[in-house]
Image: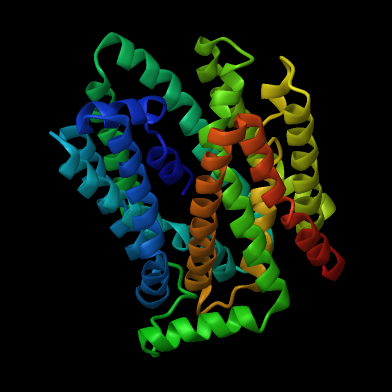
């Protein structure tokens, strides 16, 4: 799973994606609409793919996502215009939805099968840290390739890691604790919703997960803030530094959660990020970009996943995860739209502070979970 995550996120076109989409589609407005369709597609597929995972199995769902992701990247690389790009982002949205609730469930079920589910935080931290190292390395290589050849060459080369990702997925074994369900699809979805409604801890953790995901909309606006403090050429280094910090957080998360517990780790991580972001934005200095973002992102994310997986039921684990992701996608869209309007009217600092204010809602929820733990 570590290599699967590394190959899946080894996308060299990351830093130049919007520029490439604009080049193919004809305008930045068209490029922005393509990205919006990708988010909408992912949200639309979330719940059906979660049910699919619970009913048909984790391995098959992972492989289906890898096939869709390869097809999406072939579409990006060969797109002659706007229409093919749209089809490709819908495929990527499908792949993202197939993986979102499924892959963490696959890891948890694999550990549950051998009686080591208590080690979920440590293994999840190591597995998910590979996302960050892949993003950091791919961004650096992609910049060099784009400068030496072309933007399309970067996208074409990015197809190769996705093919490797599919090959790795074929080697994954299905956990034996998962069995096909006898209920129909609507009955299964209703059971998952009742499970969330009847569990106060799961209700609050689902909302915490969605609020934290909505804060990632700040990543699209943060470079504008950083460009006002640092030279433009340093933005790539700043992004690589952020991925490096997240990588370290993921790797250390198992140890930290083992010492503090998942609920306390999540609470302290969110509090630390809230303070760091507020300091960076209220009085901007040359040091602000280092503080901006989510320094505790890796540790907090694994703590969040650990708390969620403990509360999910074995029968509806992936469906419950997909419902949480769906709520996160909706909040992401609303927060991103609101932040864009605020940025146009009052500036980038006000927009980023607005996003931070929304995320602060997660603090009392995390405190409540900590008190109940």
In the displayed structure image, the side of residue 104 where residue 25 appears, left or right: left
Residue at x 44%, y 19% (from the top left corner): 140
Position above or below: 143 against 106: above
Q: Nearer the viewer, residue 126 or 187?
A: 187
Residue 15 horizontal side relative to residue 272, left or right: left
**Color scheme of the displayed model:** rainbow
Could you tell me which quadrant the C terminus lies in?
bottom right
Q: Residue furthest right?
A: 371
Pinpoint residue 85: horizontal percent, then vertical percent. 22, 41
Location of residue 350 by image quarter: top right
User: Compared to 169, does 118 lie above or below?
Assistant: below
With 151 as the anchor, is 257 left or right in this view?
right
Front residue of 164/320: it is 320
Tell me what residue is drawn at x 53 percent, y 18 percent: 235
Point 74% across, 28% down: residue: 280
- In the visual, does 109 lie left or right of 371? left
Residue 168, visible in the rendered structure: yes
């Amino acid at each position: 799973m570590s290599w699967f995550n590394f190959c899946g996120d080894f996308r060299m076109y990351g830093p130049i994606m919007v520029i490439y989409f604009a080049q193919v589609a004809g305008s930045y407005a068209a490029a922005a609409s393509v990205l919006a369709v990708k988010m909408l597609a992912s949200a639309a597929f979330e719940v059906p793919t979660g049910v699919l995972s619970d009913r048909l199995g984790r391995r098959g769902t992972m492989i289906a996502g890898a096939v869709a992701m390869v097809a999406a990247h072939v579409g990006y690389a060969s797109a002659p215009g706007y229409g093919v790009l749209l089809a490709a982002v819908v495929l990527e949205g499908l792949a993202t939805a197939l993986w979102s609730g499924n892959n963490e469930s696959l890891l948890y079920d694999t550990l549950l099968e051998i009686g080591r589910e208590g080690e979920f935080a440590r293994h999840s931290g190591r597995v998910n840290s590979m996302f960050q190292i892949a993003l950091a390395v791919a961004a650096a290589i992609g910049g060099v390739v784009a400068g030496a050849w072309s933007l399309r060459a970067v996208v074409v080369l990015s197809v190769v890691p996705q093919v490797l990702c599919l090959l790795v997925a074929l080697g994954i074994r299905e956990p034996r604790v998962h069995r096909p369900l006898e209920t129909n699809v609507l009955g299964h979805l209703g059971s998952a919703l009742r499970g969330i409604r009847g569990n106060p801890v799961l209700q609050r953790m689902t909302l915490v997960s969605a609020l934290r995901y909505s804060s990632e909309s700040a990543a699209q606006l943060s470079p504008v803030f950083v460009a006002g403090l640092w030279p433009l050429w340093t933005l790539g280094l700043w992004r690589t530094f952020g991925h490096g910090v997240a990588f370290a957080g993921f790797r250390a998360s198992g140890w930290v959660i083992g010492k503090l517990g998942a609920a306390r780790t999540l609470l302290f991580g969110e509090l630390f990020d809230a303070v760091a972001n507020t300091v960076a934005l209220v009085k901007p200095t040359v040091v602000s970009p280092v503080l901006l973002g989510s320094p505790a992102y890796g540790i907090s994310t694994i703590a969040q996943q650990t708390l969620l997986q403990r509360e999910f039921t074995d029968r509806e684990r992936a469906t419950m995860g997909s419902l949480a992701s769906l709520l996160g996608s909706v909040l992401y869209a609303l927060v991103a739209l609101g932040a864009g309007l605020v940025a146009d009217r009052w500036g980038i600092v006000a927009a980023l502070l607005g996003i931070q204010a929304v995320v602060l809602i997660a603090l009392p929820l995390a405190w409540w979970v900590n008190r109940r733990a």
